[in-house]
């Protein structure tokens, strides 16, 4: 293997993946098919492994603190991040998170949502494979008081009166509640009260006094290295061993049966240790290249997905409306896991992102830009929309008016013809235009447009009848 360049090896794998039928009896002996199958299996399992590694890091505390909380307990974010915040890339300044990780493989959990008084919120529930299996909130269930029992695979039992069952396909569940907030002191106080009234308890403790146990801290857990880097650093053996273990309590979907048959030929079986001895010594040696090749293929989908139709490129904006529910589109699911873990269903949110006015240019604060919306053509969203400014590393930008995003809540000033211009630049465009100003850094920057609950009637970003306007340089 050492004498074969990585580029050549990838080419050989691609050719042989076409020449040799997947799942043939040669997989255990042929290094090329073993790697091709391994890459496919890696991409398939990437969401489940990433979810588990994320869960471990985010729950590795004794009590709720910052962005982390023990299993079964809420993280309640109380304010929007500042420009100094560096824990998570692409933070938002529109919704306050109320999140928790639970394990429903042994016992259901009961989620109680209070009356939100018509405030926009959503409470998506992600299974271990990153599918959003339920999403209570204003769009789907309204804003009145609600109670849900989140049950695991195979659970059967009786629920208390007034509690509706939401069955999770997996034992791992990530609750990713988002509540709209304007960011004023008064609105912060209102949302904090709402957050405090949201409760989560095991079914056995429902209706009784309950104090959650302290979390167990693993001192060996790397709490600094980004989760994605930790996943990518796993050896093929460790990765597939963890994947097989996780599939016991997080069963694959029925539609995944063909994929499971392919994986079994490599010794990857749910609930059993990865058995690399099924591969010949040469195939096993080649198998060590699987993580690097698979990760390259996942990230390449950001471009290849545009050709396939899973990703879209319009006026310098890249986005997708294929998130939250993936079926057997494993490569799309893996990419969204890598670049946007926790993504909503498109009916709840779409996130066009732009690094430059076109594929050859990057935005730069040395220039001035305008984003022009014709009359009546502001982003069509029933929840809210916002345009957020990030530096080149996807973090907030410090600026004199402390504005990280711009939206209708800025009381945007229209032009005489009813159109609206957003001024995207480093220096103020002048006092009469500051209501429409999104401050930029001096150097490179990135823009993200958020449409929460995008409208389904025309014009709509969901069917392509509304197009994100280009951001144009002005002299």
Image (cartoon, rainbow, N blue to C red):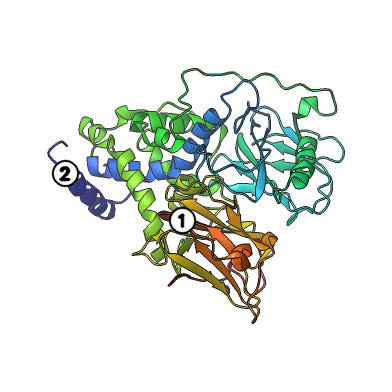
Tell me if mark 2 has few (under 14), some (14-19) or many (20+) residues whose alpha carbon lies within 10 angstroms of its own: few
Residue extending farthest left: 3
Give the labeled residue for mark 2.
Answer: 5
Q: Position of residue 64 (x, y in %)?
A: 65, 27
Residue extending farthest right: 161
SS for tag 2?
Answer: loop
**Rendered residue at 21%/49% (across/down):** 12
38, 426: nearer the viewer:
426
SS for tag 1?
Answer: strand
Q: Position of residue 256 (x, y in %)?
A: 49, 46
Q: CA distance from mark 2 to mark 1?
A: 35 Å
Q: In the image, is 179 to the left or to the right of 442?
A: right
Q: Quadrant of residue 264?
A: top left
- Location of the C terminus (image quadrant): bottom left
**Rendered residue at 23%/40% (across/down):** 31
Q: Nearer the viewer, mark 2 or mark 1?
A: 1
Examine the rendering and report whether any part of residue 7 can be seen: yes
- Location of the N terminus (image quadrant): top left
**Rendered residue at 77%/35% (across/down):** 196
Q: Quadrant of residue 287?
A: top left
Residue extending farthest bottom: 417
314, 192: nearer the viewer:
192
Sequence-earlier tag: 2 or 1: 2
Q: Position of residue 121 (x, y in %)?
A: 72, 50
Q: Position of residue 71 (x, y in %)?
A: 63, 27
Tell me if mark 1 has few (under 14), some (14-19) or many (20+) residues whose alpha carbon lies within 10 angstroms of its own: many
Q: Is residue 105 above or below residue 218?
A: below
191, 305: nearer the viewer:
191
Q: Quadrant of residue 68?
A: top right
Examine the rendering and report whether any part of residue 247 can be seen: no
13, 464: nearer the viewer:
464
Give the labeled residue for mark 1.
Answer: 446
């Amino acid at each position: 293997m050492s004498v074969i360049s990585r580029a050549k090896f990838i080419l050989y794998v691609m050719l042989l993946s076409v020449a040799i039928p997947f799942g043939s009896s040669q997989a255990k002996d042929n290094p090329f098919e073993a790697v091709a199958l391994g890459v496919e299996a890696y991409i398939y399992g990437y969401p489940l492994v990433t979810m588990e590694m994320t869960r471990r890091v985010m729950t590795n505390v004794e009590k709720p603190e910052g962005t982390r909380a023990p299993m079964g307990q809420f993280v309640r974010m109380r304010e929007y991040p500042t420009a100094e915040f560096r824990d998570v890339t692409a933070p938002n300044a529109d919704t306050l998170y109320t999140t928790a990780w639970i394990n429903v493989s042994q016992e259901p959990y009961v989620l109680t949502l209070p009356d939100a008084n018509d405030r926009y919120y959503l409470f998506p529930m992600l299974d271990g494979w990153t599918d959003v299996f339920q999403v209570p909130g204003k769009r789907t269930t309204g804003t009145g008081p609600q109670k849900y029992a989140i049950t695991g695979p195979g659970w059967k039992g009786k629920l208390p009166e007034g509690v509706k069952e939401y069955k999770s396909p997996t034992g791992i569940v990530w609750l990713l509640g988002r509540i709209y907030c304007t960011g004023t002191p008064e609105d912060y106080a209102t949302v904090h009260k709402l957050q405090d009234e949201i409760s989560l308890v095991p079914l056995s403790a429902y209706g009784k006094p309950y104090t959650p146990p302290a979390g167990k801290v693993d001192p060996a857990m790397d709490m600094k290295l980004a989760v994605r880097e930790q996943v990518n650093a796993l050896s093929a053996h460790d990765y597939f061993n963890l994947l097989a273990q996780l599939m016991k309590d997080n069963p694959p979907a029925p539609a995944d049966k063909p994929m499971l048959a392919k994986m079994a030929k490599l010794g990857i079986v749910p609930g059993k240790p990865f058995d690399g001895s099924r591969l010949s010594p040469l195939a096993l040696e080649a198998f060590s290249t699987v993580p690097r090749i698979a990760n390259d293929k996942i990230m390449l989908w950001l471009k290849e997905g545009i050709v396939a139709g899973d990703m879209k490129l319009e006026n310098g904006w890249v986005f997708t409306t294929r998130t939250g529910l993936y079926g057997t589109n494993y490569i799309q699911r893996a990419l969204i896991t890598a670049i946007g873990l926790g993504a909503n269903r498109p009916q709840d949110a779409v996130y066009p992102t732009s690094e430059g006015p076109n594929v050859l240019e990057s935005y730069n604060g040395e220039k001035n830009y305008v984003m022009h919306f014709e009359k009546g053509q502001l982003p069509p969203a029933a929840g809210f929309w916002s345009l957020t400014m990030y530096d080149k590393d996807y973090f907030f930008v410090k600026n004199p008016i402390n504005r990280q995003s711009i939206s209708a809540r800025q009381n945007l000033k229209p032009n005489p013809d009813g159109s609206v211009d957003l001024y995207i630049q480093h220096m103020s465009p002048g006092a009469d235009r500051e209501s429409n100003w999104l401050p930029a850094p001096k150097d490179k920057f990135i823009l993200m447009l958020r449409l929460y609950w995008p409208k389904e009637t025309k014009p709509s970003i969901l069917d392509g009848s509304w197009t994100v306007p280009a951001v144009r340089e002005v002299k």
